[in-house]
């Protein structure tokens, strides 16, 4: 296990792997996301502002990958979702993640985004209270499952949470009401979330858990669907109807307002019925890897 020396060789290799996961997440969009963006680009009319915006996005993706530079000037909140072998010391592993974030920031893979909430001071490390955010759980398998989401502030700002019933949008406590809430969130976002967007949605839970699970939906692949038929149907309906609103890429107008919608449902108490909507921008930066107990990347997940 990671002991007092953290098996120096293991610590060094694992640190390098963590930095590489951060680099790849920040600079290279996964193939499934690129395919979805190209499909959206093909839907936009020639000569339209939507087509122009999607063309700029395509160019940006290529340049970032070629130069190994961040896709966006806002490299966002750093969100880790990790499963690690039970024999590994959680505190030391978390410390190593923070060390990797600091190193990746110095290398320029992450911009110096994280500031003190009260003073606004930026120490240039992206490490501080609550930063990076690490959701880590032990498991019985003998490898690490390390997934990372970089979520920019612009798309984070247009997330929304509804408590049903909601008379403002005419939403009752059913899937019809849920859909009204999600589409309202899209309508309110307009182009401010750097669309075309991807939605992660949770039905149920408490306020905190609802948002957490909604962000976990961003770990799903673009071409999957919910195993629950009613939610799979709702995912398709929301995406299809959102793309008739005319908001389009960056709010310039067009057919591609959303790329995908991912929805989960979790238990709630009878007094509460929350719908939590997290919005991801076109720079859908999520990546993950299977990492051996020797610290080496064995497989990329996306």
Image: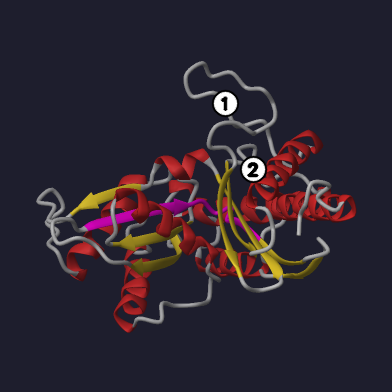
- For residue 152, side relative to residue 72 (left or right): left
Seen in the picture, residue 96 relative to 50 is either above or below; the reply is above
- Residue 158's quadrant in the figure? top left
Residue 262, image x and y in percent?
42, 67
Q: The C terminus lies in which quarter of the figure?
A: bottom right
Q: Is residue 10 visible?
A: yes
- Residue 87's quadrant in the figure? bottom right
* First of labels 2, 1 by sequence position: 2
The residue drawn where x is 81% and y is 38% is: 107
* Label number found at residue 277: none
Q: Nearer the viewer, residue 88 or 292?
A: 88
* Label number found at residue 115: 1
Is 278 part of what is drawn in magenta? yes
- For residue 50, side relative to residue 240 (left or right): right
Q: Nearer the viewer, residue 219 or 177?
A: 219
Provide the residue span drawn in magenta.
Answer: 274-287
The residue pinned by badge 2 equals 72
Residue 70, image x and y in percent?
71, 44
Q: The N terminus lies in which quarter of the figure?
A: bottom right
């Amino acid at each position: 296990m990671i002991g007092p020396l953290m098996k120096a060789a293991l610590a060094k290799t694992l640190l390098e792997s963590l930095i590489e996961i951060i680099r790849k997440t920040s600079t290279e969009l996964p193939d499934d996301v690129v395919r979805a963006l190209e499909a959206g680009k093909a839907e936009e009319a020639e000569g339209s502002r939507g087509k122009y915006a999607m063309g700029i996005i395509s160019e940006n993706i290529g340049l970032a990958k070629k130069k190994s530079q961040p896709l966006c000037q806002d490299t966002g909140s750093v969100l880790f979702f990790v499963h690690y072998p039970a024999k590994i010391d959680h505190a030391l592993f978390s410390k190593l993640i923070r060390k990797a974030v600091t190193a990746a920031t110095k290398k320029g893979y992450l911009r110096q985004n994280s500031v003190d909430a009260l003073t606004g001071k930026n120490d240039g490390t992206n490490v501080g209270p609550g930063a990076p955010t690490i959701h880590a759980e032990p498991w019985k398998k003998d490898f690490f499952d390390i997934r990372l989401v970089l979520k920019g502030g612009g798309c984070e700002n247009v997330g929304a949470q509804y408590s049903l019933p909601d008379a403002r949008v005419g939403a009752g406590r059913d899937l019809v009401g849920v859909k009204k809430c999600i589409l309202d969130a899209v309508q309110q976002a307009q182009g401010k979330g750097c669309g075309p967007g991807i939605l992660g949605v949770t039905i149920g839970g408490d306020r905190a858990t609802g948002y957490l699970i909604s962000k976990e939906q961003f770990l799903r692949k673009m071409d999957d669907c919910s195993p629950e038929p009613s939610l799979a149907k709702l995912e398709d309906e929301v995406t299809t109807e959102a793309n008739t609103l005319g908001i389009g890429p960056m709010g310039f107008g067009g057919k591609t307002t959303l790329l995908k919608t991912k929805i989960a449902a979790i238990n709630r108490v009878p007094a509460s019925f929350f719908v939590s909507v997290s919005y991801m921008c076109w720079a859908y930066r999520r990546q993950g890897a299977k990492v051996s107990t020797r610290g080496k990347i064995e497989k990329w997940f996306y």
